[in-house]
Image (cartoon, rainbow, N blue to C red):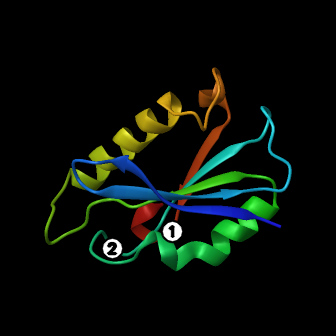
């Protein structure tokens, strides 16, 4: 059974949040996966890939699905900056351990890929 924690704020300035999907057995060796949702930089949401995130957690990955800023309200390089900020936040958070930068994989769909 996957445990899901929704709407963890990672960027208060821009109101950005992430959902976290935990696998059954999480330990210090658990691989971390960041999944960027698609949507052509102007639509889509972290909620749209919930089922995929559950499948990834069931495969053993602690899966993070962050929001990012989108057009037309925000233009390039906003989403790119959000990705960099999320990775920095994650590495500084209590969700990772020292050395976890070697345990992180990033994937995505469409523009998120």
Using a 10 Å C-alpha cutoff, classify the residue at mark 2 as few (fewer than 14 neighbours), some (14 to 19) or many (20 or more). Answer: few
The percent position of residue 70, horizontal first and vertical second, equals 25, 66
Quarter where residue 20 is shown? bottom right
Q: In percent of the image, x 50 and y 38: which residue is there?
A: 90
**Place of residue 85 in the rendered image (x, y in percent of width and height, measured from the top left):** 35, 40
Residue drawn 63% across and 50% down? 33
Q: Say which residue label 1 marks.
A: 109
Q: What residue would you read off at disc 2?
A: 40
Q: Out of 72 and 14, give the one closest to the viewer.
A: 14
25 shown above or below 108 = above
Element assignment for label 2: loop
x and y percentages locating residue 89 in the rendered image: 43, 36
Q: Position of residue 64 (x, y in %)?
A: 57, 54
Going from N to C along the chain, the mark reached first, 1 or 2, is 2
- Residue name at image x 39 percent, y 77 percent: 44
- As displayed, is residue 92 above or below residue 27? above
Question: Which residue is at 30% across, 68% downward?
Answer: 41
Mark 1 and mark 2 residues within 8 Å of each other at the beta carbon:
no
Left-right relation of 113 to 54:
left
For numbered disc 1, what is the local secondary structure? Answer: loop
Q: Quadrant of the N terminus?
A: bottom right
The foreground one among 10 and 52 is 10
Between 82 and 11, the one lying in front of the other is 11
> In the drawing, what numbered circle is on residue 4?
none
């Amino acid at each position: 059974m996957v445990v899901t924690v929704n709407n963890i704020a990672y960027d208060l300035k821009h109101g950005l949040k992430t959902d976290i999907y935990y696998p059954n057995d999480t330990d210090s060796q658990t691989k971390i996966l960041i999944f960027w949702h698609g949507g052509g930089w102007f639509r889509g949401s972290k909620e749209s890939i919930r089922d995929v995130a559950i499948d990834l957690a069931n495969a053993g990955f602690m899966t993070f699905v962050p929001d990012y800023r989108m057009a037309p309200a925000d233009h390039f390089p906003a989403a790119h900056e959000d990705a960099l900020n999320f990775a920095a936040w994650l590495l500084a958070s209590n969700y990772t351990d020292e050395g976890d930068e070697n345990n992180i994989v990033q994937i995505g769909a469409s523009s998120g890929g």
